[in-house]
Image (cartoon, rainbow, N blue to C red):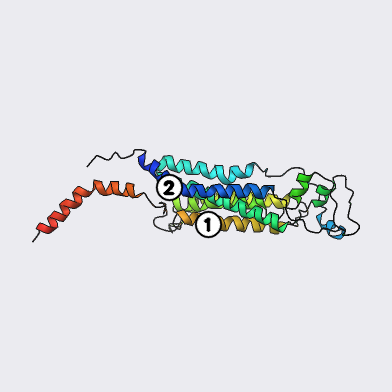
């Protein structure tokens, strides 16, 4: 029987090949997400009387810029996964951690944009998006708004529900909080307050993002959009984490429940064949 070289990259390569179909499933999700981003959202009838509720101050800048959301939701957890990987050298933990976070954010993004396009809820600043000059214009027959602003800005004006900033951030940072809870055994009932502080830090970041979405509009009328996005991202993050890892309070919370390769298991079985054979022979020869 040939010697088995432990620590060789072969098991890692075979592991990636074995689960390539899992990664390929993400491609249709990304394609669907791209299509949803280009899709024109449903436009509700907005008459002059209801426009008074959408006359909040024009939004100049976001407190949390759009490019900062992927950094918080994907890059930050990825850095934590890398630190854990180099600390423990555990590819069987790193791979499902990465796949889980990408699945969580991708699924959340797809469902969020599907809801945005279907619901078509106007943002609180729709008036200023539609009429940059401050002069309203409405159809004399249908009484619907006749927009004169930039088409791309107006398109985003009908994508208020649910909040994308909120759902994306909760999908990534809630997943990170679950991951940290399992790795540091936060629920081992040993009264480590520091552990609770660690797992709540991602939740503190995501709370800041969610609150910023409400504060960016001085009328605070669409806080339910933020709450819906938070619930959506949190639920998907929980499902994606538990797909690959046990509950954080599980005794095996440090380990991934992602299936190991049969070849890897056979390698360890082969290494123990001699010991098992000798034990079996001793059992047969014993009186």
Q: Quadrant of residue 189?
A: bottom left
* Residue drawn where x is 52% and y is 57% of the image: 239
Q: Is residue 208 above or below residue 45?
A: above
Q: Quadrant of the N terminus?
A: top left
Give the labeled residue for mark 1. Answer: 238
* Quadrant location of the C terminus in the rendered image: bottom left
Say whether residue 204 is left or right of residue 221: left
Horizontal side of 280 relative to 81 (left or right) equals: left
Residue at the image position 29 percent from the left and 49 percent from the top: 266
Residue at image point 44% right, 48% down: 19
Where's residue 14, x and y in %?
A: 38, 43
Q: Is residue 42 among what the camera can see? A: yes
Label 1: element kind: helix
Give the percent coordinates (x, y) of residue 243. Answer: 47, 56
Q: Earlier in the sequence, mark 1 or mark 2?
A: 2
Other-residue count near label 1 (Cα within 10 Å), few / some / many at <14 / 14–19 / ≥20: some
Q: Name the residue nearer the viewer: 174 or 41.
A: 41
Q: Is residue 196 left or right of residue 232?
A: left
Label placed on residue 93: 2
**Horizontal and vertical percent for residue 85?**
43, 42
Percent position of residue 229, x then y: 64, 56
Q: Secondary structure at mark 2?
A: helix
Question: Whole-Å distance between the Cαs marked 1 and 2?
Answer: 17 Å
For this rendering, which residue is in front, 9 or 76?
9
């Amino acid at each position: 029987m040939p010697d088995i070289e432990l620590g060789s990259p072969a098991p890692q390569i075979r592991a990636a090949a074995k689960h390539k179909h899992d990664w390929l499933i993400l491609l249709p999700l990304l394609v669907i997400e791209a299509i949803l981003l280009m899709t024109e959202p449903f436009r509700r009838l907005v008459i002059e009387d209801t426009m008074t509720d959408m006359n909040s101050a024009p939004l100049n800048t976001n407190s949390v810029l759009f490019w900062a959301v992927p950094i918080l939701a994907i890059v930050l957890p990825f850095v934590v996964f890398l630190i854990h990987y180099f600390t423990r050298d555990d590819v069987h933990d790193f791979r499902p951690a990465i796949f889980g976070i990408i699945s969580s954010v991708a699924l959340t993004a797809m469902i969020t944009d599907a809801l945005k396009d279907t619901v078509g809820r106007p943002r609180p600043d729709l008036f200023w998006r539609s009429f940059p000059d401050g002069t309203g214009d409405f159809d004399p027959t249908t009484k619907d708004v006749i927009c004169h602003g930039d088409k791309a800005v107006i398109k985003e004006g009908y994508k208020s529900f649910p909040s994308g900033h909120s759902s994306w951030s909760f999908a990534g940072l809630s997943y990170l909080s679950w991951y940290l809870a399992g790795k540091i055994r936060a629920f081992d009932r040993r009264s480590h307050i520091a552990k609770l502080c660690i797992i709540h830090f991602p939740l503190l970041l995501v709370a800041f993002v969610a609150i910023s979405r409400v504060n960016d509009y001085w009328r605070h009328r669409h806080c339910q959009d933020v709450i819906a996005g938070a619930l959506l991202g949190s639920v998907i993050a929980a499902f994606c984490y538990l797909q690959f890892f046990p509950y954080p309070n599980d005794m095996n919370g440090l380990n991934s429940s992602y299936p190991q390769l049969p070849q890897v298991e056979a390698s360890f079985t082969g290494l123990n064949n001699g010991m098992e054979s000798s034990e079996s022979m001793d059992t047969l020869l014993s009186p």
